[in-house]
Amino acid sequence: MIQPTLLRPALRQFHQQPLYTFACAATLALAVAAATASLAVIRPAFLDPLPFTAGDALVTLYTHTETWEKAPVSARVMTELIESNAPIEEVVALDPQGVAYARAASTEQVLGLRVTPAFFTILGGPAVGRGFGEDERDAVVLSWSFAQRALDGDAGAIGRSIMLDGTRHTVVGVLPPGFGPPYWPQADVLRPLDLAGLLATRPRGVLDLTVIGRLREGASLAQLDAHLAAFSGRLQREHAEVHGRERWVALSLRDELIGNARTVLLGTAAAAALLLLIVAANIAGLSAALAVSIRDRLAVQSALGASRGRLLAERLLQSAAIGVVGSVAGLWIADSLVSLVAAFQPQFLSRMAVIEIDAATMAAGFVAGVTVAVVAAIVPHATVIAGRLDLLPGARGATGDVRLSATRSALVVLQVALALVLVVGAGLLVRTVRHLADTPTGFRSEGLNAMTMNLQGPRYADEDAQLRFEQDVLAQLRRLPGVAAATASIGVPVIGGMRAPLTIQSGEGDDVGTEVAYMSLAPGFLDVWGIELVAGRDFGVEDRNDAPGAILINETMARRHWPAGDAVGARIWVGAGAPEDPAAWMTVVGVVADLRQHGPVEPVLPTAFGSTHQYSWPARWLTVRARDAAAPISAEDLRRAVHAVDPTIAVGLIRTVDDMIANGTGQHRLMMLALTFFGSVATILAGFGLFAVVSLTSRLRRREYAVRLAVGAEPAALRWLVLRHGLRLASVGIGLGLVVAAAGSRVLTGLLHGVTPLDGLTFAGTAFGIAILAVIATWMPARRAARTAPVEILSS
């Protein structure tokens, strides 16, 4: 139990050294906030067990194609893999779809998944009710949050029916609170996947399913890889026309859920750790300065009978109190940061579990904060207390204990070095984001608003009905005030479309070429999006469903396959299994400028564009261009235009295209903001630490300065003496920081675009900026030293 006689002197220090207390607590709060928020984000990715029944035994299966590293798997291939005696016990197939949920007079689109029954055995079963079987076509399992709305707050109301895509479905189960399917944790509705129907109606080359399997007990991922290699070779031989350029791979589900976020998460955690280390160095430096300044007071207390243990206990309690105050404030800030990240969870983090801060994370942050405060603050005081407190002040040397002086200098060097490392990382990412923003997309995004919908149900079973809906909705959209133009597509640039094999018709026989990306566009799409037509023509009214197939290609595809520039008029087939009837083939009618169809980060792919009037699909994108980009069309107006044609159609995502582009660079922006924040705080702390050390040294050397001035030294020479001391420390820190940054910047390679990890401009600019900061931080102590009054100092 802490004695009041120890606690009172410790707490008295808050009043006696308010600036020291505030500086330590405030900087500690920032570090604890950064470290705790970072831990809350990385915890579900790296530390927590997977929230699924089979845990880390789960793997994801992919089709590796010529242009698609991780493509979905076809239903036929999944079935044949199961029959091949692969080292997998169970496999679940998932197919995401927008679902129109109707209640009373309103219809909304929610995220749904078609899944096979194995979902409930290897991923997780309902908390209430049960899963469904293969033949229960109208059964549905709801997420816990959606069930609260759909079942009027009674998640246990199993057996009730709800309207989905115009058809009544019976609720047979509700998933546990907080549980979400992998890749789509926000999914609200699970429905049975008609695997038999897919096998009967879809060609084996259609890649449409996400497949997750559980490794057989005792089997390893390496064994599965070996099996898949043999399996791939067999299918390449037996179905060369479809699978000749494909192979199948398996990856850990945990690694896939983290995906591209790994670098950002680990980088942010490393930056938070560096900031915590900088704050520890800052507190240690401030404590060293305080220990020297109160040395005489400690000597008086010692002379009056206070033991060294008692003196150390008082400083220990003071450090712990600062640690508690700073840590509590930091946890409050961290909770706000995590809530902000969870509310605006970037797209590249959306496949992970919900980000939240729990008691264990807060406890870890609190313990780390208090530990840093106690250890960093108590070591300098312990060094002073362990020394000769009985010596007179004049007998202790001009600058105090040599070890404390060296420690203060080393801590400043460390702060400068680490601050430079963080600022270099931030600078590299700032240049990357600017490069991505300046990368031409091939279209004009300003003023464009896009929305999705899914034309499900028997009413839109045929392509003619889908086309009539498209034309009627476009007519409604064009009547809206402020709308300059409207168009439709299946897939959009930035999001991208599908991938398909390409077959080129030639006089010497058909040539199965490379794989291409594919989207369907409505006539007039090029004008609405501002896409340049390089050669040939756009789609027109003549390209009807009963007319010869017409197709557009991009410049990359034209250069690859028709380098002589004669692409227009070429006959091709996009898709598996080219038809034997030559009249069924597609004719290239135009060449369009290259588009960044998967955002500014990904390379331009050879791409073919069909017409929605000839090649339709239930999933639609509608795009409108506002007359004034500064006054976008309201989402409610867009919904009303759709519901004027069919009130049962649910409108899904409504976003500006600029926002969609920004989402593609979300990980770069998040990492840039994190490093900029950490680097800014670290730089301020480094400057403050340098100022504190130089100020303390100058104050302790006042008598020396007075003597120098008394014997004829110029004030300018004295000013330069102090400046040189500060700049020497900063130079060592800058040199050390450049070496560490040169080695560490390679970690960011996967996030850098248009800039190298050793970009000279970034390194030089950062070093120059830190040097300027060092001059500013040292100038005031140097100026004060030059104004020393010899008579006052030497006579005191």
Image (cartoon, helix red, strand yellow):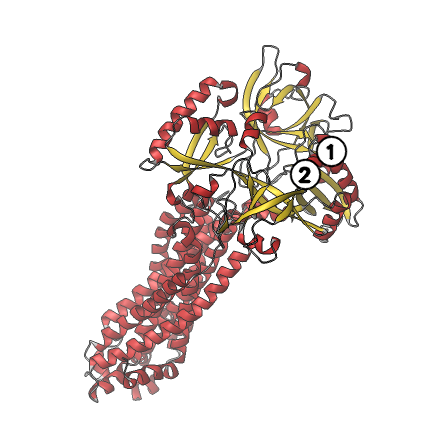
The label on residue 521 is none
Sequence order check, earlier mark of 2 and 1 = 2
Q: Are marks 2 and 1 in contact (CB under 8 Å)?
A: yes
**What SS does tag 2 mark?**
loop
Residue type pointed to by label 2:
Leu
Q: Is residue 358 left or right of residue 599?
A: left
In this rendered view, identify the residue nearer to me: 43 or 15.
Answer: 43
Residue type pointed to by label 1:
Ala
Residue 656 shows up from this direction = no
Q: Quadrant of residue 501?
A: top right
Tell me the CA gap for discs 2 and 1.
Answer: 9 Å
The residue at which mark 2 appears reads as: 455
Q: Position of residue 752 (x, y in %)?
A: 47, 44
Q: Is residue 668 left or right of residue 389?
A: right
In this rendered view, identify the residue nearer to me: 338 or 675.
Answer: 338
- Quadrant of the drawing holding the N terminus: bottom left
The residue at which mark 1 appears reads as: 465
Q: Position of residue 28 (x, y in %)?
A: 40, 68
- Quadrant of the drawing holding the C terminus: bottom left
Q: Is residue 591 above or below residue 712?
A: above
